[in-house]
Amino acid sequence: MNSKKCYFTENNIKYIDYKDVDLLKKFLNPHARIISRKKTGVTAHHQRNLANAVKRARFMGLLPFVSR
């Protein structure tokens, strides 16, 4: 994941869907925390959208809030 290029820009993803759990899991660490922009290389705009999508998915029960 350390490719310093925005994953969403490179793959031409316009909308980050909260139902796309496999994609969202790429940006979570083993403890189910969102990985920082510095590590993933995602743009600020996409990072905000990603955070909202993860929070929505957690609220809907698709992703865990905490993982051991």
Image: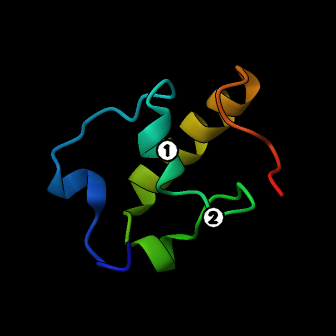
The residue at which mark 2 appears reads as 29
Q: Position of residue 34 (x, y in %)?
A: 63, 58
Q: Amino acid at mark 2?
A: Asn
Seen from the viewer's position, the closer of residues 37 and 26 is: 26
Q: Which residue corresponds to the image point at 75% horizontal and 61% vertical from the top-left?
A: 31
Tell me: residue 16, above or below residue 7.
above
Decide if residue 63 is on the left or right side of residue 4.
right
- Give the SS element for disc 2: loop
Tell me: residue 33, above or below residue 11.
below
Label disc, if present, on residue 61 of the rendered structure: none
- Give the SS element for disc 1: helix
**Mark 2 closeness class: few <14, some 14–19, many ≥20 residues within 10 Å:** few
Decide if residue 43 is on the left or right side of residue 65.
left
Q: Which residue corresponds to the image point at 15% horizontal and 45% vertical from the top-left?
A: 12
Mark found first going from the N terminus, 2 or 1: 1
How are the residues colored? rainbow
Q: Which residue corresponds to the image point at 59% horizontal and 46% vertical from the top-left?
A: 51
Label disc, if present, on residue 24 of the rendered structure: 1
Decide if residue 55 is on the left or right side of residue 48.
right
Tell me: residue 34, above or below residue 22.
below
In the rendered image, which quarter is residue 23 located in? Answer: top left
User: How many marks can you see?
Assistant: 2
Instruction: Give the CA separation, mark 2 to mark 1.
Output: 11 Å
Decide if residue 19 is on the left or right side of residue 43.
right
Seen from the viewer's position, the closer of residues 48 and 56 is: 56
Quadrant position of the C terminus in the picture: bottom right
Seen from the viewer's position, the closer of residues 68 and 45 is: 68
Q: Amino acid at mark 1?
A: Leu
